[in-house]
Image (cartoon, coloured by chain):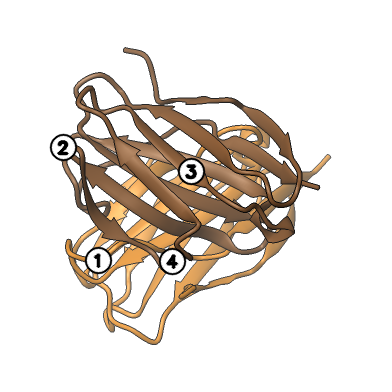
Chain colours: A orange, B brown
Amino acid sequence: GQQLNQSPQSMFIQEGEDVSMNCTSSSIFNTWLWYKQDPGEGPVLLIALYKAGELTSNGRLTAQFGITRKDSFLNISASIPSDVGIYFCAGQRDSNYQLIWGAGTKLIIKP
Amino acid sequence: KAGVTQTPRYLIKTRGQQVTLSCSPISGHRSVSWYQQTPGQGLQFLFEYFSETQRNKGNFPGRFSGRQFSNSRSEMNVSTLELGDSALYLCASSYFPGQGNNEQFFGPGTRLTVL
């Protein structure tokens, strides 16, 4: 099925480092969502973006809706151990279409 | 408020069998969506139900079907199982349909293994 290009696929970082990940698409989206999935659980919504250029924060997380509407970025500042998990982006063209998901970025924090 | 519950949590089947998975949405939520998640592939949309009607369907073969009951509980069925159907099947509920503009709450998933 159709997917967004999400990168990186995985990240090994030290506690306290900042993290950046992004999603790109060849199609324009009107909604971008970022989710986090912990082991054994379903994804949980972190940030929702509905407008090109929008920059939204949720604690140490900041996400941006790209100006071209074909990409989105998620940054995590000062990572902590509980940030480990898989982060997914998801985009939607409009409410008549289903969400399209990225393959995920696995975040691992080195002890 | 109880979250989305899915049963069973784990299931092992053999090729050719059929399976039914169940999802109970959050109380008051009338929209239920189903996804298939495989490693490295993200989530693939299966279908969305609202008020007992299938509102949207992904690109899966007809072996995958679903339904929603009057209490908003939903089931999905996979017939003639194939090895490639091994995956985590996630259910998500929301008050209204439209997955992007209504926050979906996901259940923990049913891990299906086909041998």
In the image, what residue occupies the spot 39% across and 21% down?
B3
Q: Residues within 10 Å of mark 2 (few under 14, many from 20)?
A: some
Mark 3 lies on residue: B77
Chain identity of mark 2:
B
Residues behind callouts 2 and 3 on a single chain: yes
Badge nearest the viewer, 4 or 1: 1
Instruction: Choose top left, top right, bottom left or bottom right for residue A12.
Output: bottom right
Q: State the residue at coordinates (38%, 58%).
A: A63
Sequence order check, earlier mark of 2 and 3: 2
10 Å crowding of disc 4: few (<14), some (14-19), many (20+): many
Q: Position of residue B80 (x, y in %)?
A: 62, 53
Query: How far, Cα to Cα, is label 2 from label 4?
Result: 35 Å
Q: Residues within 10 Å of mark 1 (few under 14, many from 20)?
A: some
Element type where label 4 sits in the image: strand
Residue A97: mark:
1
Q: Is residue B3 above or below residue A57?
A: above
Residue B51's label in the rendered image is 2
Identified by mark 4, the residue type is Phe
Disc 3 marks a residue whose amino acid type is Asn
Q: What secondary structure is marked by label 2?
A: loop
Which percent across, then down, holds residue B43?
51, 57
Under mark 2, the amino acid is Ser
Q: Earlier in the sequence, mark 4 or mark 1?
A: 4
> Along the horizontal axis of the image, is B83 left or right of B74?
right
| Badge count | 4
**Badge 4 vs badge 3, beta-carbon distance below 8 Å:** no
Contact between marks 4 and 1 (CB within 8 A): the answer is no
Task: Residue at 61% x, 59% y: name it.
Answer: A105
